[in-house]
Amino acid sequence: MHKLLRASLASALLISAAMVEAHDAQVVKGFKNPESVAVAKDGLVYVSEIGEFEKDGDGKISVVGKDGKVKVFASGLNDPKGLAFIGDHLYVADKDRILKVGKDGKWSVFVDKSAFPAPPKFLNDLEPDLAGNLYVSDSGDIANHGGDSGAIYKIDTKGKLTTVINHQQDPRVKAPNGLLMDDTGDMLMFVDFASGVLYRLDIPNRHLIELAKGFGGADGIVLAANQHLYISDYVNGKVFSVSVDDVVKQEKQGFQSAADLGITADGKTLLVPDMKAGTVTWIHLH
């Protein structure tokens, strides 16, 4: 079981109620293919908008203020997906590269596609550790259940990239998507879009353990203050919870395509981007 990992992850949650009351049960509309959500230290919510798939330059990052109004934060991106904050910088998995965005919305390429050991197919989620490293999932040939190109990479603070695990090293790694790191930097949870399985990866030993399954087109994963994991099913438009004892429960359905989840800083409100509907939904957790 993974109680120790869950406790370790929980200790990394910041306690702040900045956005809960303002956005409890709120739905914000008008996004174009919103894929990922990240919450900044000040409580503002950032949303990656792919725009039109495979059309470079029309992607953007929007920010939702505490009044619920949406503004463009960064523009001119390609197909932005996973988001992660490290300090004051926002990092973006943008199609086949990783971008670094400053507080002013200006961005630069942090890791170009040439740095990857194999050409990236579908860079997807981003997850930081407490040391400032980034982890990025490449879901591979996602239309072909990942093919043989699924992988997870680590990027250090200087932008050096190394392979954590890939399909060649373990064939269970098909189309890794949502990532969740513990506060030791040694244990990484991820969900696989192709198999719908939740895994725990012991990074130093490259030991992969199946924890739960049945998540359809598994997309995002977050840890809430109630010690439950929440996992989105993009294909079936559902959100599931996983208890400390790995009991799976369907919590929400009816989304057209529940993508990469976010969580408020206090861990009490779930943020669900629905790509096809063009919405982000705030769900208060009990």
Image: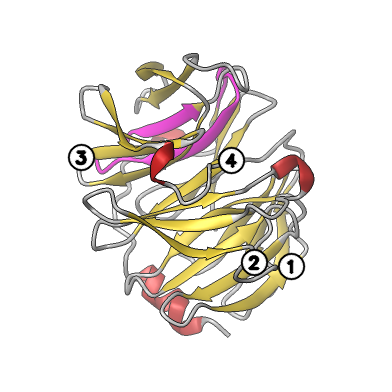
Choose the circle earlier in sequence order: 1 or 3: 3
* Magenta span of residues: 28-48
Q: Amino acid at mark 3?
A: Asp
Residue type, mark 4 in image: Phe
N-term mark: 1 or 2? 2
Amino acid marked by disc 1: Lys
Q: Is residue 47 above or below residue 237?
A: above
- Confirm or deny contact between disc 1 and disc 2 (CB under 8 A): yes
**Callout 4: few (<14), some (14-19), or many (20+) C-alpha neighbours within 10 Å?**
many
Question: Quarter of the image containing the N terminus?
Answer: bottom right
Answer yes or no: is residue 221 visible.
no
Query: Closer to us: mark 1 or mark 4?
Result: 4
Tag 4 or tag 2, which sits nearer the N-term?
A: 4
Kindly report the distance in space between the C-alpha atoms of the residues bearing marks 3 and 4.
26 Å
Q: Secondary structure at mark 1?
A: strand
Where does label 4 land, which residue?
122
Q: Which residue is at 53% across, 81% downward?
A: 2
Residue matched to label 2 = 198
Task: Identify residue for label 3.
Answer: 88
Disc 4 secondary structure class: loop
**Residue behind mark 1:** 213
Mark in front: 2 vs 4: 4
